[in-house]
Image (spheres, helix red, strand yellow):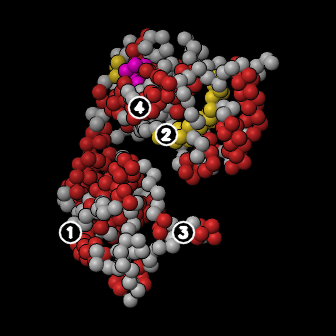
Amino acid sequence: MAKRKAMQEPTLFSARAPVGQPLAERMRPRSISEVVGQDHLLGPGRMLSRMVEAKALPSMVFWGPPGVGKTTLAMLLARDSGAEFRSIAAVAGGIAELRAAVGDARDVVASGRRMVLFIDEIHRWNRAQQDACLPHVESGLFTLIGATTENPSFEIISPLLSRARVLVLNPLTADEIARMVSRALADTERGLGALGLTIDEAGSAELAAVADGDGRRALNTLEVAAELARADSSPQVTAHHVLEAAQRKTQLYDQKGDEHYNLISAFIKSMRGSDPDGALYWMMRMVEAGEDPMFIARRMVIFAAEDIGNADPRALQIAISVRDALHFVGMPEGAIPLAQGVTYLAGAPKSNASYVAMKKAREDVQQHGSLPVPVHLRNAPTALMSKLGYGRDYRYPHDYGGAIIAQEYLPDELRGNIYYEPTERGYEARIRDYVARVREARGKAPRQAGIGREEKPK
């Protein structure tokens, strides 16, 4: 049977890209070794590296922001595993395109090969469209690779997720963006090497800031910035060229490239050091330079949770209120609630105990994987679940003296672990006392069934 026309669509691995393609498309990696970033997946011995070596490709979902290599990785993995590659853009394609792909897959399988079906922005497909993939993924007719910028837990149906591995792709770092830029400026075949341009340190830093972890944005901005540099007869791409190419407002304090980050760092550290004067100064430096005030407000929200936490639980509420007031009032008057919030956060007692506890819990989650929920903590909304014992030995704390019972709330493998260690600063001192009393009392409280003697509720 003749292959359908869709199977003969051009690949992105040709030696010379079509004229008029954006720089990011021309510089798309042609081998795994050219991929920049995602070392946690592509480094020696890592998951995707092992897949390439074994030429074994399971169904997967790539979850990550735009411009980090989801499409490129899918194409390279398909090629290196010896499979045909077929793609569907979920925003434009639906059941009809899937049926055509299924037909292509049957042709490919009949010829003794395998097919990878790549669905870009798979989260845009509704449940019925995703359901239509299930029987073919389950039968192995094709290997599915979906790409999404949204949380798969919420946007992709559970049956499909259970048949695919979810791999998280990270935003590119400033160093990784710089590597991509240097490669593009040096490449005479696909890149800008024929122009003989370099990029100065400030320009490179500004390009990384503009890209915000997006390699495609970085390269396409570089292409325009390079043309601006040529028009100026400049041998270097500068921060000025990058800002003009990105059509982003030039900030007075960004003339040295990294000054943007220096000022926000000074702002955060002044608040962390409980210095309202320093924090106000650095805030106004950014405001007067034309910084996006919502950027400042976002940093304040993060700071309130990370550096103040439960030492003053009102701090997060105030930071959110500042954001809302700024959005409602706008600038320049928005600087007034900003100033109020900054002085409050700087003057509040500090604790990062919640932040530290979060990181400890995350380490256990990453180290131990999906430990089962203890049966006594499970909900039992159906008769079958009740029959299986879900929730049977759970004890309702309010039925016991002091609302305390020695009941385990962690998986058996993590029994006794302590993540949160409150400080003695601000309101958290009260939390510290209470948590200490509870932890001590739980050792003396009635034990749950299976652990020790059970007492009647008081």
Q: Is residue 312 above or below residue 118?
A: below
> Which residue is tagged 2?
167
Tell me which label, 4 or 1, sits earlier in the chain: 4
Near mark 4 (Cα within 10 A), the count class, few <14, some 14-19 or many ≥20, is few
Look at discs 4 and 3 and give the one toward the viewer.
3
SS state under label 1: loop
Near mark 3 (Cα within 10 A), the count class, few <14, some 14-19 or many ≥20, is some
> Which residue is tagged 1?
425
Q: Residue at the location (46% across, 38% down)?
A: 169
Tell me which label, 2 or 1, sits earlier in the chain: 2
Residues 74 and 239: in front is 74
Residue type, numbered disc 2: Leu
> Which residue is tagged 3?
389
Near mark 1 (Cα within 10 A), the count class, few <14, some 14-19 or many ≥20, is some
Q: Is residue 25 above or below residue 286?
A: above
Residues 432 and 226: in front is 432
SS state under label 3: loop
Could you tell me residue 400's position as x and y percent? 39, 84
The stretch of residues the image draws in magenta is: 180-184
> Which residue is tagged 4?
46
Could you tell me residue 54's position as x and y percent? 50, 24
Classified by dominant secondary structure, the portion drawn in magenta counts as helix
User: To which quarter of the image does residue 278 belong?
Assistant: bottom left
Look at discs 3 and 1 and give the one toward the viewer.
3
- Assess whether mark 2 and mark 4 are in contact (beta carbons under 8 angstroms): no
Distance from the alpha carbon under mark 4 to that under mark 1: 43 Å
